[in-house]
Amino acid sequence: MRTRTLLAVGLALGMAAAVALPARAKLGGGLPGGPLADLGRAGQRVSETLETLTDPLRDRVATTLSDAGTLARGRVERLARFVEVNRNSVDWDENRQPSVRGEVLLTDPDAAAIESARRAGFGLIEEGAIDGLDLHFARLSVPSGMSLAEGVRHLRKLLPGREISADQIHFPAGQVDKRRGQGTPPSAALPRGGTVGVIDGGIAGSARLVAQRAFAGSAAVPSDHASAIASLLAGSGTARIVGADVYGGAASGGNALAIARALGWMRQMQVQVVSISLVGPANPLLGRAVASVQAQGMLVVAAVGNDGAAAPPAYPASYPGVVAVTGVDGAGRVLIEAGRASHLDYAAPGADMSALVPGKGRVSLRGTSYAAPLVASRLAARRASGAADGRAALSAADGEALARSKRTGRGVLCNICRSGL
């Protein structure tokens, strides 16, 4: 009976796709890819391995899987609601990922490719280079009557071998609790200072903010999420913050092109460490932008997300060379909701901590969103204190990391940094 019950927990992950949504058509139907397929594959893997475990371990696994199943179903439902509510500006791409509606990105376009696309009914919205990077792109509108997914597939057939994608949307990897927060003040014993770039929403209320630019809309729109991150950076000793608002308060904000442009601007501002607490799918244009700034010496730090271990690998955390960060609570336990990346570098506090947010005062925080900037603060401090390059900063940070393990990567950084000032 116990075995059947435990197997049912695992199989529930695979079956969740059938029950999570009243209208399965919201995800385009079928399980060829996207959130539903990820859920099904996770359930299949779980059911195949449960029988190999001893009874005590199996009991613990069953509890964890129950939580993982809830997170996986929640992710599917959340994405479906997001696309449904914002269907005028958001659509599913060919992999069932939320993306900017009706727009396709072409990397390294030339006149012949754009003309071929135009003859096929695609319109040229914009062509140019990302400032600060040697990276050229074109934004093309999908022909009338085509869905975004159909448009991506059609253009790939028309231009084989080209880097073509939708402009996928990235989501914040943490939440701000309106309740008054409590936390431990940061320590002054470790090196402090340096500059951290924050690619997120608009930042408000930070005396450490030295520059801010909008990449979605005409002006930065303050967000609690970004403002809390700035508060944590100030509290952990970061001297200067450079902010890039890639949302502008719009549903289609947080897209890959906006993040790539923000990275180019950070490069122009000579920012050496950038923190990105956003998650989304892999995108070729954004991947190229990340690689470009890394080649010029920038350390990119990113959160692994909060959709649980059953979620697909999060990006930009999963791009090669990005410093991927998970979160731990006040007892040093990895957050149950922590997502995953193709690799893991560090953990940092992601719960039982607080920050100052304009209009709300001190609030409680939870999520890997808030772990990433704390790691960025430590790396920026090492760069400011004499680390010759990113590799040297990482080596120095390793010396202060605690509790190295498979679940915390190279260890936990900034464990005492639990209160933004």
Image: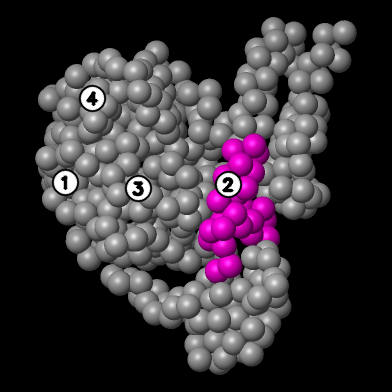
Q: Position of residue 309 (x, y in %)?
A: 59, 32
> Residue 192, relative to residue 130: is it above or below?
above
Which residue was labeled with disc 2?
85
Which quadrant of the figure contains the C terminus? Answer: top left
Dots 1, 2 in contact, CB < 8 A: no
Any part of residue 390 in sight: no
Magenta residue span = 76-103
The amino acid type found where label 4 is placed reads Gly
1 or 2: mark nearer the eye: 2
Residue 337 part of the magenta segment: no
Element at label 3: strand
Q: Residue at x 17, y 22 (%)?
A: 187
Give how far apart the Cα atoms at labels 1 and 4 are: 18 Å
Element marked by disc 1: strand
C-alpha distance separating marks 1 and 3: 14 Å
For residue 3, which quarter of the picture? Answer: top right
Mark 4 or mark 3, earlier in chain:
3
